[in-house]
Amino acid sequence: MKKLMMTVALVVMTTMSMQAQLLYKISGNGLTKPSYIIGTYHLAPVSFADSIPGLTEALAASEQVYGELDMTDLMSPENMQKMQAGMMLPEGITLSKLLTEEEMGRLNVVLKELMGVDMTNAMVKQQLDALSPQALQTQLSLLIYMKKHAGFNPQATFDGYFQQVAQQQGKGVGGLETPEFQVQTLFKGMSLERQKQLLMCLVDNKDYTELMAERLVKAFFAQDLEGVKAVMDEKEHNQCDSTPEEEDQLINDRNANWIKLMPQIMKDKATFFAVGAGHLPGDKGVLTLLKNAGYTIEGVK
């Protein structure tokens, strides 16, 4: 959840231009060929690609595709092992040791509702007890989505679609980040106490989490980046809100890092970038940062 800080008329005009738009063309600033960038949602189905105007043409005109990660690299046995290890608690620590008995009881209520079983089941406890609170929170968020959206296929997602198309067309694929970086950022960037706090925020506010998830999904499928950002920016004004430091770590600093890499990538080859939709809008978003760097950003119709 990030703060919205748009103050001048130019930024207001930019915001208006981003309504109902996920795909943008990047040109100017010395580029001989345009590149493209699209905002994604990792739980959206591949079929949603048919709803994006100009998508097929933009992919065809691009010489390579870049995501947050190179998915082929991510799926290598070595990196899968690193990702799985990154989701685990340090040796000797378990969730049932981190949480009080009363907190475990509240967690079990949510697990029972979402999974039909809880950690009073020895097999379930064996599987979940070693997960970090952040990793379990991620899994619960996925289960909440799947409860509302039957038929979700994690093997065929909107995120991975673009790299699959590139590979089918014999084009290059790359990543703006490494698996190691994402493990550190997504699963190791907070203290265990803070991870526990946020896990319990989900447990104690499951209905609100479901509501916010549905609002986010609705905004994304409406191709409304500002709607996506509005959901992400909403505050509860309690410990469940992201801190400014967490917002920087998860969104703003990563955006700034990508902007350092993208100019050379686009200069080398016309590139189709596919990154999380929440990274695009706002005064620290990728679209504004690209404009500030001298590029022309136009919605693809």
Image (cartoon, helix red, strand yellow):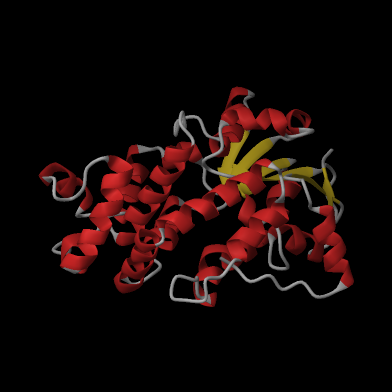
Q: In the rendering, at what x and y percent does residue 173 appear?
A: 58, 38
Residue furthest to the left: 122
- How many badges with numbers are in the image? 0
> Which image quadrant: the C terminus?
top right
Residue furthest to the top: 168
Relative height, residue 290 to residue 174 (above, below): below
Query: In the image shown, does 241 or 8 lie closer to the viewer?
Result: 241
Is residue 258 in sight in this rendering? Answer: no
Query: In the image shown, does 62 or 40 lie closer to the viewer?
Result: 40
Relative height, residue 37 to residue 133 (above, below): above
Q: In the rendering, at what x and y percent does residue 51 appear?
A: 71, 31
Query: In the image shown, does 214 or 263 lie closer to the viewer?
Result: 214
Q: Residue at x 61, y 34 (%)?
A: 162
Q: Residue at x 55, y 48 (%)?
A: 214
Q: Is residue 290 left or right of residue 256?
A: right
Q: In the rendering, at what x and y percent does residue 50 appear?
A: 69, 28
Q: In the rendering, at what x and y percent does residue 293 appear?
A: 79, 64
Is residue 206 in sight in this rendering? Answer: yes
Query: In the image shown, does 197 or 182 lie closer to the viewer?
Result: 197
Relative height, residue 253 to residue 77 (above, below): below
The answer to which quarter of the image holds residue 36 is top right
Q: Residue at x 79, y 33 (%)?
A: 54
> Which image quadrant: the N terminus?
bottom right
Q: Is residue 270 left or right of residue 233?
A: right
Q: Is residue 169 left or right of residue 8?
A: left
The answer to which quarter of the image holds residue 234 is bottom right
